[in-house]
Amino acid sequence: MSDDEEIEIEAYPLRSYQVIADPNRPDVVALAFETERGHSLYLASRAVLEDLGRDLLDRASKMPEHKTVS
């Protein structure tokens, strides 16, 4: 498959997530995501977490404000 071919990937809303530290592996954490299709677990290094955090904050800042009903 070439780099210019697009792949369609199904996306599901996140129900919850957890960041799980492992005292036996202090160089990584597990990122657990729950969707309607079940759970997925990924390992991330400090560098990945730092990049992900920046990217998530940047993306969130570009989204409309969440309005609460009072």
Image (tube, rainbow, N blue to C red):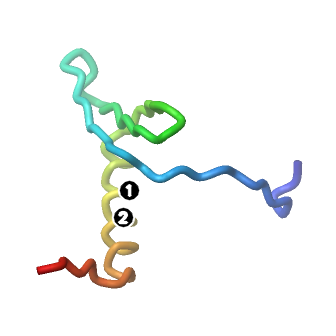
Residue depicted at x 37% and y 35%: 32
Residues tagged 2 and 1 counted as in contact (Cβ below 8 A) = yes
Q: CA distance from mark 2 to mark 1?
A: 6 Å
Which residue in the rendered view is the most extreme toward the front? 70
**Residue that sits furthest to the left in the current view:** 70
In this rendered view, identify the residue nearer to me: 40 or 20.
40
Name the residue nearer the viewer: 33 or 49: 33
| Disc 1: which residue | 52
> Relative to 34, does residue 62 appear above or below in the rendering?
below
Point 23% across, 81% down: residue: 67
Task: Judge the density around disc 2: few (<14), some (14-19), many (≥20) Cα neighbours within 10 Å.
Answer: few
User: Does residue 51 lie above or below 27 as drawn?
Assistant: below
- Residue underneath mark 2: 56
- Where residue 8 is drawn, which disc sits there? none
The extreme top residue here reads: 24
- Judged left or right of residue 61, residue 7 is right
Check disc 1 and report its element: helix, strand or loop: helix
Position of residue 37 measured from the top left corner of the image (x, y, whole percent): 54, 36
10 Å crowding of disc 1: few (<14), some (14-19), many (20+)? few
Q: Secondary structure at mark 2?
A: helix
Q: Position of residue 70 (x, y in %)?
A: 11, 80
x then y, percent, for residue 52: 38, 56
Q: Amino acid at mark 1?
A: Leu
Count the marks.
2
The structure residue drawn at horizontal position 45% and vertical position 31%, both measured from the top left corner, is 39
Q: Is residue 42 left or right of residue 19?
A: right
Residue 34 sits in quarter: top left
Hey, what amino acid is under mark 2? Leu
Taking the spot 84% from the left edge, 63% from the top edge, the residue there is: 4
Nearer-the-camera pick, 12 or 42: 12
Question: Which quadrant of the structure image shows residue 63?
Answer: bottom left
